[in-house]
Every structure is written in C-alpha cells, then in structure tokens.
Amino acid sequence: MLRHVVALNYVNLHAGILTVILGTGRCYSVLQLVKTFEQVSGRAIACKNGPRRFGDIGQYWADPSLAYELLGWKYRRGLEQMCIDAWRWQQYCEKRMLNT
C-alpha cells in the first residue's frame, strides 16, 4: 500500500495531529548537496565558501524512526536520486511555465 494512504488511514483512526519526520537519518553537508546537484544537473552552481554564520549549527538530520514505527515508512532513495528527482521536477515546472 502506498505510504501516503497508510498515513491517511492512521490519521483517520487516531485523534489529534500526527507529525513525523521523513528523511534518511543521514547527515549531508551543503558541499555534498551542491556537488551532487551539479553532477545530476550538468550545471555549475556558484558557491562562496566562508565561515559559519552566527547561529548556524554544525550538523543536523532527521530521525525517521517514528515514521517507520507508526507507518512502516522507510527511505528508499539516497542523495543522488533525491537530487535527480528535484532536478526533473524543476525542469518540468519550467516547461509548464513556458507553455502557459
């Protein structure tokens, strides 16, 4: 069964609000994300390295264990596939904007 259907069924059976984190449980750096997106898009991304800004945290990532516990949800894609999907969506949206 599709995970979004499982989530809707869960919400229908339980009172209140359900908030779960959907992520890989892995930490990726901004540089990893930029390099991967450059690779899948075939385009260079202008970046400027600098010191961490005040208030920036060193690392963070999502803990998807509650989503698995309640909904059976587990990530299936890594960073490369997520960037491929995001790039494909961007291209689709750009084409739709040009055709309207």
Image (cartoon, helix red, strand yellow):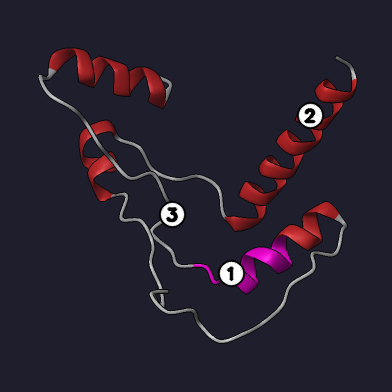
- Say if the magenta span includes residue 29: yes
Circle 2 is placed at which residue position? 92
Circle 3 is placed at which residue position? 24
Q: CA distance from mark 3 to mark 2?
A: 25 Å
Q: Position of residue 50 (x, y in %)?
A: 62, 84
Q: Secondary structure at mark 3?
A: loop
The single residue placed furthest to the left in the displayed view is: 15
Of the 4 image quadrants, the one containing the C terminus is top right
Give 3 or 37, whichever is nearer the viewer: 37
Amino acid at pointer 3: Thr
Amino acid at pointer 1: Val
Residue at image location 30% in from the left, 35% down from the top: 72
The single residue placed furthest to the bottom in the displayed view is: 51
Amino acid at pointer 2: Tyr
- Say if the magenta span includes residue 86: no
* Mark 1 or mark 2, earlier in chain: 1
* Mark 1 or mark 3, earlier in chain: 3
Q: Residues within 10 Å of mark 1 (few under 14, many from 20)?
A: few
